[in-house]
Amino acid sequence: MSLVENYGWSSNKPERSHHYLLPIVLKNLRKYKVNRLLDIRTGNGATLPIWNKNGFKVSAMEPDKIGFEIASKNVNADVRQLGCSDILPLDWKNNFDGIVSLEVIEHMFDPMQLAITSFSALAKDGILIVTTPYHGYIKNLFLSIFNKWDFHHHPIGAEATLNFGLRQQ
């Protein structure tokens, strides 16, 4: 069960990071001759048509109801409403030569679940590609100056961090 009911998806528009991430990810998927691809936490499914266009047999999982509804409109992908802590479907076990999880792990309450799910879905000699945003020096400096690291990294956001009393002073 997800701690956040709705991640705010409203369309299938691509993320800002796609223009620089996807060429590198695609290059590596081709390098390792991936055919069957699982997109973990696909969000709104904006990457699904790109994976299809590049010849991958695509499956995807998304725990958010609205994200799932948007992503599942892609008829060329097997999209299921699942989170990493859910039981993996039997037909997905050891079935994928490639798994991607883009710009997601930093938001997860239990990132180990991503690893567990990935390694149970990967076929022998499969490749896992996980990306996380690069902040750079300036952003890190501002987070430090304004004492916002706890807010920034908390998986359910700054407002919930205050409500849980983890950051009250």
Image: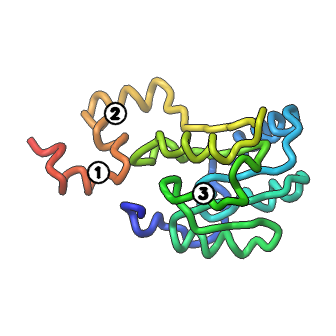
Closer to the camera: disc 2 or disc 1? 1
The residue tagged 1 is 158
Q: Position of residue 70 (x, y in %)?
A: 64, 73
Q: Earlier in the sequence, mark 3 or mark 2?
A: 3
Residues at badges 3 and 1 in contact (C-beta under 8 Å)? no
- 140 or 83, which lies in front? 83
Closer to the camera: disc 3 or disc 2? 3
Please tell me the numbered disc located at residue 35. none
The residue tagged 3 is 88
Left or right of 14, for residue 37: right
Left or right of 50, for residue 55: right
Residue reaching furthest to the left: 169
Is disc 2 placed on a helix, strand or loop? helix
The residue tagged 2 is 143
Residues at badges 3 and 2 in contact (C-beta under 8 Å)? no
Q: Amino acid at mark 1?
A: Ala
- 26 or 94, which lies in front? 94
